[in-house]
Amino acid sequence: MTRSTIELVPTVEDHRIARHAAAAIVLTVAEAVIPLPLPGVKPGLANIVTLIVLARWGWREAVWVALLRVFAGSLLLGQFLAPSFFLSLSGAVASLLMLGVAMHLPARWFGPVSHSILAAFAHIGAQLMVARLWLVPHDGVFYLAPVFAAAAVVFGLVNGLVAARLLAELQADDPGGPATA
């Protein structure tokens, strides 16, 4: 009888994705304990990690980090396959798609702050659509759009500014490292 073994050897990229996903998961879990004035309005602190990964290592790695964060975060918080998981997943996918488009916009005018705001709008737009189509079968859910849009602007701006600052510091510490967008 012949035995075959499969050995998976993680690459440097795998380790980097795992480290960034772990950081994003920690921020997701920490954010879950922050009391917020409105249900569903969260700062999205883990998106800072996604923005940094996008700028330094590209969209593919940002997708891995964001999706690992959604799945692992929902498992840790006991929300896997609950409505909040699907809301989070739809928001993450919409944000990633928006970031995939936004990263091709002129870097002279579009950077981490504008990317963050665009992603925040895509995130909340997808969540409102999922809520309307699945959870609240009434157009009244769209009355919340201005509140969520304001939150997207505020949190998108703050997260983008934090990401831009961290990217600038990373670039200063490692000028020969990966290029920042």
Image (cartoon, rainbow, N blue to C red):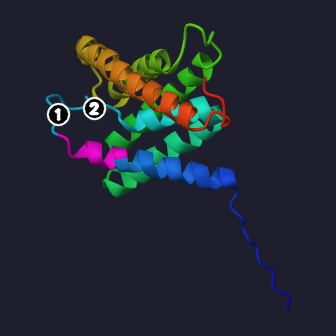
Please give the range of residues in magenta: 27-34
Residue sticking out furthest to the right: 2
Where, quadrant-wise, is the N terminus in this rendering?
bottom right
**Residue type, mark 1 in image:** Leu
- Considering depth in this image, is 146 or 45 the residue closer to the camera? 45
Q: Quadrant of residue 135?
A: top left
Residue at 63% of width from left, 9% of height from top?
A: 106
The residue drawn where x is 50% and y is 35% is 50
Left/right of residue 81 with respect to residue 173 in the rendered view: left
Q: Position of residue 86 (x, y in %)?
A: 40, 39
Circle 2 packing at 10 Å, graded few (<14), some (14-19), many (20+), is some
Q: Name the residue carrying label 1.
A: 36
Q: Is residue 13 visible?
A: yes
Front residue (pair 1, 37):
37
In the rendered structure, the answer to whether residue 36 lies left or right of residue 5 reads left
Chain-order first, disc 2 or disc 1: 1
Q: Are marks 2 and 1 in contact (CB under 8 Å)?
A: yes
Can residue 30 be found in the magenta stretch? Answer: yes
To which residue does mark 2 refer? 42
Q: Amino acid at mark 2?
A: Lys
141 or 151, nearer to the observer: 151
Position of residue 14 relative to residue 64, above or below, is: below
Depth check: give the residue in front, 92 or 49.
Answer: 49
